[in-house]
Image: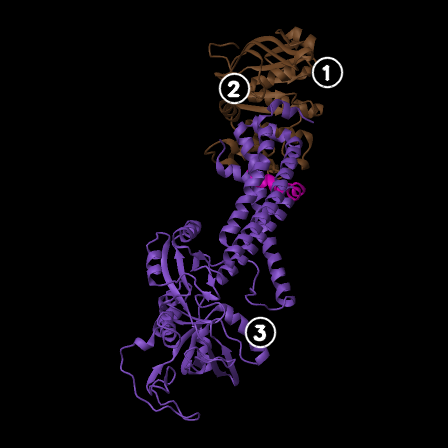
Chain colours: A purple, B brown
Amino acid sequence: MMPAKNLVKMVVGNTLRSRRHFILSAFGIVIGIATFVLFLASTEQVGAVLERIFPVEEVEVVAPQVSLLGKDISKRLDDTLVQTIKTRPEAKRVLPRMSLQFPAYGDGTFNGSHLSLEIGGAADGIDPSYVVDDAALSAKEHEFFADVFKDWESDPTPRTACVPPGPKDPNPCPRTDRYYCDKVDRQCHHRVPVVLSPTMLELYNTQFAKSHGTPVIDQDFAKFIIQQGGMERMRFTLALGVSVFGSASAAGKSREVEATVIGISSKAKKIGMTVPLAYISRWNTEFVSRDAGKTYSSIVVTLAQREQLAVFAQWLQDKLDLRLEDSLGEKFATVVFVIRLVLVIISLVIIGISSINIAHNFFMQVTERRRELGLLRAVGATQTDVQLVVMGEAGLIGVIGGVLGILCGWLLSLAVDGLSNHYVPNFPFKPTTWFHFQWWILLGGLACATFFSVIGGYLPARKAARMQPAAALAAQ
Amino acid sequence: MADKAAPVIRLRDVTKSYGVGSAKTPVLRGVSFDVNPGELIALVGQSGSGKSTLLNIIGGLDTCDAGEVEVLGLDTRKATDAARAKMRNESIGFVFQAFNLLDHLTVLDNVTLPASFTPDAKDLETRGREALRRVGLADLAKRRPGELSGGQKQRVAIARALFGNPKLLLCDEPTGNLDSQTGKEVIDFFRELNAKDGVTLVIVTHERRVSSVAQRVIAMKDGMLVETTDEALAAGGGPA
């Protein structure tokens, strides 16, 4: 077989000497690969956005709603059930969530605007580790959340006594950015740490901030807090047992605590707010019943492997009579997968047609160049050498066509992003780019282009190799 | 002329036909002869007599239907494609009537083309220029074939054939596309090559002036041989 260096030199020389042949052969591959990488990059980005909104490796176990004469008799989610689910091999982590089961509202002033929001039913509690251990957090965020997002009421440090200040009096507690003076027990308490979901942040930024003239919140929430003048500026009052609509809790009591928004977490309740579980449990016990303080609204299960979802769901239904909450994320992921499959098939069809086009062009080339190929045989080329030369030329067209295709796809993506940024109005989770060019997409595009080109060149190369040198040399 | 050394070419009852069935046309009918080392053979005959086919079979560019073909000790019928290619690359030089130069390569690159298929080929440029010097074209190494005259092209083709210092030179109508003066120069070159370097030459030709310099003339008629110089000239000699 001819030395590889000579093969490469001959292949490059032959490919570059016929521009017409190159353009005719590579055109389809360029178009095919451009669509291939563009489609994959766009569906990859859509998938990434959806995963940010709906993490699919986490599922929420809920009890089917059952009522009798208007009374909720649904299965109760309690610690026993949590322990049972923990025994399953599919479950990597099992954490209960508890909803606030009585009326409450948040009230505060932000950047000069007075805000009141009903949170009864829209607030829940979760084990702090669920928020703190989120792999998506930066080291700085993790450290901050670990320091602040916890049940401060169980902190063994003795509390400082205080006199509740008047509306214009300064905060009498030490570390005013964190502590407030409780009106009931006249002691300094750490403000209840609250995290909000990215959905809330998006809704605030795209809907609320503009209409109320409040500042847009940066993705780096810690930075935003500093810009706003510290955590104290993020505080608000939680009126427990009272609704913004005027109704009160069944127990007929109410009180106020102070809370502070400490950050954004994808683990927070999508619409509402999330605090450490112990707060909600205590409040439900205080304002509803002891039982309410031990009853969970759902159980968040992190699966060991995404593929185990079906097995786990079946076990839940068969053994515990529970179900998974309808997961929009899963449905969207399926839709995105199907769309991606269709788009990839379309681009593969285009590339496949290009491959046929390459075969056609190379058959013509082999016929046109048979004297040349015959000469190569006469001066010492084997059948394999000739086949490698022709297939190498096809492969090189694939590589160059693939690179040009990727380049075209990338330029097209810039154009689409540019148009989108100018003409498509903002909406929640609108990405800054519609494409995510992962390395495997680019590599896959290049490999695909090369593979299909070599396939296209195979039969012509075989024909070239099998030509009798004497007949090839005699050709006119 | 004939010595005790093994023949460079040994043919026995070589047959070859083209086409199939009723359209089958025999081209070679039991051709047998030997060519000894250092011989200059002229293969003559009318068009369609099978001389070019025979030359191609000797060079491993074509295969026969039956018979024995042994070239430089290699049984080309039984040898693998790789073995035949190695033989062509290292031991045989071809000169064609149509030159068969590659227009996209320089003269030097055309001459060194056989080295593309030789592992560990060294000093390509030096050897290529030396081959061009031998044919008197040392100054045209960087030209393209399109810039050369017919005679120059044929000399480039001869330089390519000589590049690997072959033991056997197979020439198919080497002067067919040349004017008489250039043709004479080419023939003189072949004779000198044979006399000085001992290269064995088999030249397919129509021309009497070519066959006149041959040590032996093998004439072909209807796929069969007539091996006498006089008969050959009578049967296949062309214009003087």
> Residue sitting at 41 percent across and 53 percent down?
A316
Span highlighted in magenta in the image: A10-24
Residue B115 position in % (x across, y down): 52, 32
Disc 3 marks a residue whose amino acid type is: Gln
Q: Are marks 3 and 1 on the same chain?
A: no
Disc 2 element: loop
- Pointers 3 and 2 in contact (CB under 8 A)? no
Check disc 1: other Cα within 10 Å, few if <14, some if 14-19, many if 20+: few
Disc 1 marks a residue whose amino acid type is: Pro
Q: Are marks 3 and 2 on the same chain?
A: no
Check disc 2: other Cα within 10 Å, few if <14, some if 14-19, many if 20+: some
Q: Is residue A404 visible?
A: no
Numbered tag placed on residue B198 in the rendering: 2
Q: Main secondary structure of the magenta part?
A: helix
- Against A190, residue B76 (above or below) is above
Q: Could you tell me which chain the residue with mark 2 belongs to?
A: B
Q: Could you tell me which chain the residue with mark 1 belongs to?
A: B
Task: Write down the residue under mark 1.
Answer: B239
Numbered tag placed on residue A207 in the rendering: 3
Residue A77 placement, left or right of B81 = left
